[in-house]
């Protein structure tokens, strides 16, 4: 399809076309429900994470995941209900854009079937300020929706579970706080908690008359409840009635013909209850959680018909809950929007800390991400994301990195390791028993003992006083040890030497490789020797003298017979590799690598059935070739950089798949996906050696030499994000990294509204020094800054003094802090007339956004000290909340006036307006894509790209930032940062794709990659075709979901954005679905080409 800008002019900048994809899914839990959804006999927990739902089954081992599906909408309400005649529950979902659907689980296919769907929006009406409410009558007669002030929408449900036409009923109460249906009423009856104009809160009940489509007076009402009353809890029969939870009490209300209106109350300490969960089916016990995570048990004393008393008991502390679901046998799911979600066990006995709550499991939640920074701490070309996550006591830093994590099983201090090999105790054994570790002048053998521990042992036939060159299991239940002076053949059962081979006089064995009954070694001077192994026999078959010295060699089977090696590869000091046929050592291929760096490690390996030759050089570069397994001919040569130090290559298997470990200063795992070699970094520092170690005690493990330690561990999933938590127990607000001091400055506030700047070590993340701010002073911004004519680097912090009587702060400070002796020292400060919302280093000066003003400061020296001196400023904003800079340009994101582009003229010392977006967008984050294109996120969960029209012919056109792209992300973005979570290899195609990382309130980490126009056009065709094949859950429209929408307008479709989440589901389609997509694009296009394209995009973005 043709691509055009909104103005009709062609936009040539690469950053106009963007690919948006989720790297880390939302983790904020907004809703949870418990019921029998997948089967009448299975208890399910269903979790909503804003734009996704997760299905779990409760088992004896805990929660077992069943399904995780995206929803094309932000979930406002989620409820389970069982229609008449059904054996399983159905799921009702309402989205914030007024779409609803009812889902049923198909036990045969495992899919979610849509029973009914549709819009519930109105052409007129004021959306409710309290948020959408969706409730279901306990007898499944109606679904009730409160979406607009003064209206209650009713969706009747028939006797056979069919849905009737919806209608609206006028609701007198305009400021509704909560609504729910009562139990045990002859007609559907709602209880409405509302607030009057005097800010007093009351409750009133209404019967829903389905025939008259109107309300009738309900059984009871109550005026003047707790002013903080916020939650209505309907109580099941036989008790009935309703609980109203306030800030200082809980009230039970009901009506009976004998006693009239019944009211019971219990007071409690002043608090704000955020969530509740019913424990018993009869509604006699409830769990209540407040904003601090304090969990209370509310019990209703009763005589089986009437409630006689209320009791409240404190159980303990959990994460601050947004939802509570009681599962079974005292096990409770605590879903949280502000901290980690938890699975807890309620015990009958109090523990040592006075709590009845035991945490069984924890589910990581990155949300809300208030701020983040992207740093490359190891200087490996890969970003590490550090987020400010959580709220209040649940506040923490989260360190997020991509690649392969090593789960450490055992570690022993062993400095100076020069090589490692794993050995089995016999040829027929499945598991490794020994680990041979060699040093400069000795060799040690470690073995697994009966207690699953590593003990040092001796094998009589092995030399322990020499360095081992190579070692492996061979045929006839034998072991081979190659040392510089001898090849030893040892019986595995007895450990005795049965034969040996000695190199010619004056020569030593430098390198060796073996497989099965074959051994190849180099004895110096270019001598290559091929040996075949029999029972107690070492037979030299062939030797060949080469022109150049041999640096490395390998022999692994890549042909059709996995037990026979027919070719060997040899690396030479002449920067060449040679392939020889075995056993004749006939030269088949010689490949000149070029350059001046010798090959240090070579390896034959088959990935997904394709034979490869990998050649690692001494400078960290790696060649890969495709090998013809019959002729040895090399093709499709590629060269990439994996590090800066020599690389050692080793094969290993994980999850029945062969991978290659490249040990170096940037350890990397090489693997294949869709016939393409990919590279994933290992989350370790410099690794010198690695070997697989698949023992019975440590299955599918590897032994790794890291610095001075030997570590045995298993690998995590490849390309999975790994998260480490640094608990702060207070609210993190801003974070900044400083390379020179190798520290982070983290701005926090505690529960007593005290502000701090905490200095943390960038390697260990230990808190080094806290700098305490003044009373009522809150940190608002932080940056690392160097000034002109000053070699030092400083942390600069912007603050605001927060007073309850002020709508906006009228006073703040800019603090310039230096790091000396691991402490923060105040160098100078500058008082401001407002909050310092943002700070940027700018051309050797400091640029600050102070309330509505942009202020530039220069660094002046006076009497041997430095101070900030105002140079120039710019006015014209409502609140300049977000500022980024590029060159002479300043991009300002305003609270209400969208984005403006300013320019600093150094010669004149002024800041001038250049262009502005005249749409009324309330921005939440801004960033620069390139010199002419800028990215913004706004509070209706949309992304916008704006383009500077530098080629316009009139001043009026040049003064406008034209909209270049629009996309509904569905997430509230708090921060954009330049960077990448994947290793950006300099020689790869992906290195030229600029990427941004963003963080959201729901804990999402996403990536935005700017694409060339031809790639964008191809992906757009793929996306359009997939939308015709892949349908959203609940019949929700993908095009409608991704279309720009705010309170002013809604567009028909996204523009100049690709939904990477949809694109990457291509690999999950069935073959028939792939073929259908391909047929829609071009009849002759094969699905393999599309698969390669998707794999390439995944590699560059996530």
Image: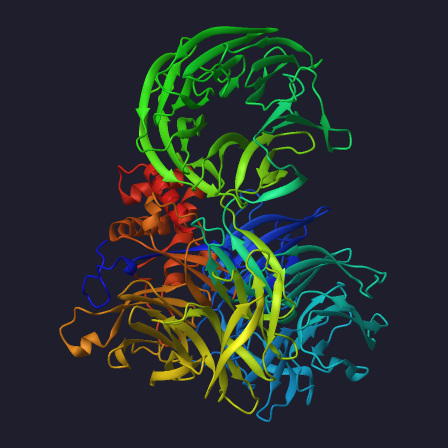
**Residue that lies at the very extreme toward the left in this rendered image:** 953
* Quarter of the image where one finds residue 183: bottom right
**Residue 464 as seen in the image, left or right of residue 732:** right
Residue 916 visible here? no
206 or 959, nearer to the observer: 959
On screen, residue 633 above or below 964: above
969 or 43, nearer to the observer: 969
* Residue at the (71%, 13%) spot, across then down: 494
Point out residue 943 in the picture as x, y percentages from the top left corner: 38, 66
* Residue at the (70%, 66%) spot, across then down: 277
Count the marks: how many?
0
Point out residue 147 in the picture as x, y percentages from the top left corner: 50, 75
**Residue 45 as seen in the image, left or right of residue 903:** right
**Residue 140 as seen in the image, left or right of residue 603:** right
For the rendered model, the colour scheme is rainbow
**Residue 581 as seen in the image, left or right of residue 698:** left
* Quarter of the image where one finds residue 334: bottom right
* Quarter of the image where one finds residue 368: bottom right
134 or 971, nearer to the observer: 971
On screen, residue 191 above or below 650: below
**Residue that lies at the very extreme toward the bottom in this rendered image:** 198
Point out residue 470 in the picture as x, y percentages from the top left corner: 55, 22
Residue 711 visible here? yes
Point out residue 138 in the picture as x, y percentages from the top left corner: 66, 67
On screen, residue 1062 above or below 272: above
């Amino acid at each position: 399809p043709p691509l055009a800008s909104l103005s009709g002019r062609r936009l040539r900048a690469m950053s106009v076309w963007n690919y948006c994809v989720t790297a880390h899914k939302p983790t904020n839990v907004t809703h949870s429900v418990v019921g029998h959804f997948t089967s009448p006999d299975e208890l399910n927990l269903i979790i909503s994470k804003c734009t996704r739902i997760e299905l779990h089954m409760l088992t004896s081992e805990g929660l077992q995941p069943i399904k995780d599906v995206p929803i094309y909408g932000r979930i406002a309400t989620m409820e389970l209900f069982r229609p008449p005649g059904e054996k399983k529950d159905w799921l009702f979902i309402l989205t914030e854009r007024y779409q609803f659907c009812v889902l049923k689980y198909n036990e045969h296919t495992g899919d979610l079937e849509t029973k009914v769907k549709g819009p519930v929006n109105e052409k007129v009406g004021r959306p409710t300020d309290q948020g959408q409410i969706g409730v279901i009558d306990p007898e499944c007669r109606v679904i009730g929706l409160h979406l607009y002030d003064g209206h209650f929408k009713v969706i009747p449900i028939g006797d056979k579970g069919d849905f009737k036409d919806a209608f609206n009923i006028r609701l007198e109460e305009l400021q509704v706080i909560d609504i729910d249906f009562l139990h045990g009423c002859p007609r559907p009856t709602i209880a409405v908690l509302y607030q009057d104009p005097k800010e007093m809160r009351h409750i009133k009940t209404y019967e829903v008359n389905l025939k008259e489509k109107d309300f009738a007076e309900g059984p009871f009402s109550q005026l003047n409840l707790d002013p903080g009353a916020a939650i209505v809890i309907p109580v099941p029969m036989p008790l009935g009635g309703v609980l109203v939870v306030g800030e200082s009490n809980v009230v039970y209300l009901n009506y009976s013909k004998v006693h009239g209106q019944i009211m019971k109350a219990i007071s409690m300490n002043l608090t704000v209850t955020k969530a509740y969960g019913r424990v018993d089916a009869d509604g006699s016990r409830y769990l209540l959680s407040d904003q601090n995570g304090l969990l209370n048990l509310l019990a209703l004393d009763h005589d089986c018909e009437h409630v006689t008393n209320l009791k409240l008991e404190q159980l303990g502390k959990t994460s601050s809950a947004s939802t509570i679901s009681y599962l079974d046998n005292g096990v409770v799911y605590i879903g949280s929007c502000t901290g980690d979600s938890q699975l807890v066990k309620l015990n009958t006995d109090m523990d040592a800390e006075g709590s009845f709550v035991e945490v069984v499991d924890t589910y990581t939640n990155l949300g809300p991400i208030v701020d983040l920074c992207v740093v490359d701490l190891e200087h490996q070309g890969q970003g590490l994301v550090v987020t400010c996550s959580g709220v209040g006591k649940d506040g923490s830093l989260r360190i997020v990195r991509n690649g392969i994590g090593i789960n450490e099983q055992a570690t022993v201090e062993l400095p100076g390791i020069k090589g490692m090999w794993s050995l089995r105790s016999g040829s027929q054994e499945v598991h490794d028993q020994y680990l041979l570790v060699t040093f400069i002048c000795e060799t040690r053998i470690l073995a697994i003992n009966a207690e699953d521990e590593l003990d040092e042992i001796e094998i009589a036939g092995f030399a322990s006083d020499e360095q081992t060159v190579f070692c492996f299991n061979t045929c006839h239940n034998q072991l081979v040890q190659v040392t510089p002076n001898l090849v030893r053949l040892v019986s595995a059962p007895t450990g005795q030497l049965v034969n040996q081979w000695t190199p010619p006089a004056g020569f030593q064995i430098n390198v060796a490789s073996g497989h099965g009954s074959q051994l190849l070694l180099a004895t110096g001077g270019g001598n290559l020797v091929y040996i075949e192994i029999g029972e107690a026999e070492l037979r030299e078959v062939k030797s060949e003298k080469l022109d150049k010295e041999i640096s490395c060699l390998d022999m692994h089977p890549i042909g059709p017979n996995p037990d026979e090696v027919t070719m060997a590869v040899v690396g030479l000091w002449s920067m060449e590799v040679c392939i020889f046929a075995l056993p004749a050592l006939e030269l088949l291929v010689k490949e000149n690598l070029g350059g001046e760096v010798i090959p240090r490690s070579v390896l034959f390996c088959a990935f997904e059935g394709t034979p490869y030759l990998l050649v690692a050089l001494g400078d960290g570069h790696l060649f890969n070739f495709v090998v013809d397994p019959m002729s040895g001919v090399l093709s499709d040569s590629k060269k990439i950089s994996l590090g800066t130090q020599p690389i050692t290559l080793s094969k290993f298997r994980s999850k029945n798949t062969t991978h290659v470990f490249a040990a170096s200063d940037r350890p990397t795992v090489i693997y294949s996906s869709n016939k393409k070699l990919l590279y994933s970094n290992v989350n370790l520092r410099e690794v010198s050696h690695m070997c697989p170690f698949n023992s019975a005690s440590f299955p599918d493990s590897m032994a790794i030499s890291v610095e001075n330690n030997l570590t045995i561990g298993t690998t995590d999933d490849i390309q999975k994000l790994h998260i480490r938590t640094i608990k702060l127990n207070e609210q993190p607000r801003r974070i900044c990294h400083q390379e020179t001091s190798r520290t982070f400055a983290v701005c926090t506030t505690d529960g007593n509204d005290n502000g701090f700047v905490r200095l943390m070590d960038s390697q260990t993340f230990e808190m080094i020094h806290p700098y305490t701010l003044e009373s009522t002073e809150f940190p608002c911004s932080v940056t690392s800054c160097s000034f002109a004519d000053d070699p030092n680097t400083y942390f600069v912090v912007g603050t605001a003094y927060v007073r309850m009587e002020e709508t906006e702060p009228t006073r703040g400070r800019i603090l310039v802090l230096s790091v000396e002796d691991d402490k923060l020292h105040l160098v100078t400060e500058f008082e401001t007339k407002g909050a310092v919302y943002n700070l940027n280093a700018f051309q050797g000066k400091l640029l600050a956004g102070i309330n509505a003003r942009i202020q530039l400061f220069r660094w002046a020296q006076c009497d041997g000290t430095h101070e900030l001196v105002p140079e120039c400023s710019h006015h014209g904003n409502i609140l300049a909340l977000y500022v980024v800079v590029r060159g002479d340009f300043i991009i300002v994101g305003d609270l209400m006036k969208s984005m403006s582009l300013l320019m600093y003229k150094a010669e004149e010392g002024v800041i001038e307006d250049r262009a502005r977006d005249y749409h009324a967008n309330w921005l939440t984050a801004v960033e620069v894509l390139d010199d002419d294109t800028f990215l913004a996120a706004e509070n209706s969960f949309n992304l916008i790209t704006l383009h500077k029209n530098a080629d316009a012919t009139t001043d009026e056109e040049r003064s406008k930032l034209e909209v270049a792209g629009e996309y509904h992300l569905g997430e509230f973005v708090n921060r954009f940062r330049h960077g990448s979570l994947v290793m950006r290899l300099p020689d790869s195609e992906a290195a030229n794709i600029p990427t941004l990382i963003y963080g959201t309130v729901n804990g999402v980490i996403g990536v935005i990659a700017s694409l060339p126009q031809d790639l964008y056009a191809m992906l757009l065709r793929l996306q359009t075709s997939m939308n015709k094949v892949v349908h959203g859950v609940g019949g929700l429209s993908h095009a409608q979901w991704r279309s720009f929408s705010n309170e002013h307008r809604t567009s028909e479709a996204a523009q100049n954005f690709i939904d990477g989440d949809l694109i990457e589901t291509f690999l999950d389609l069935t073959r028939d679905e792939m073929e259908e997509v391909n047929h829609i694009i071009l009849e002759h296009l094969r699905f393999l080409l599309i698969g390669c394209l998707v794999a390439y995009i995944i590699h560059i973005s996530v």
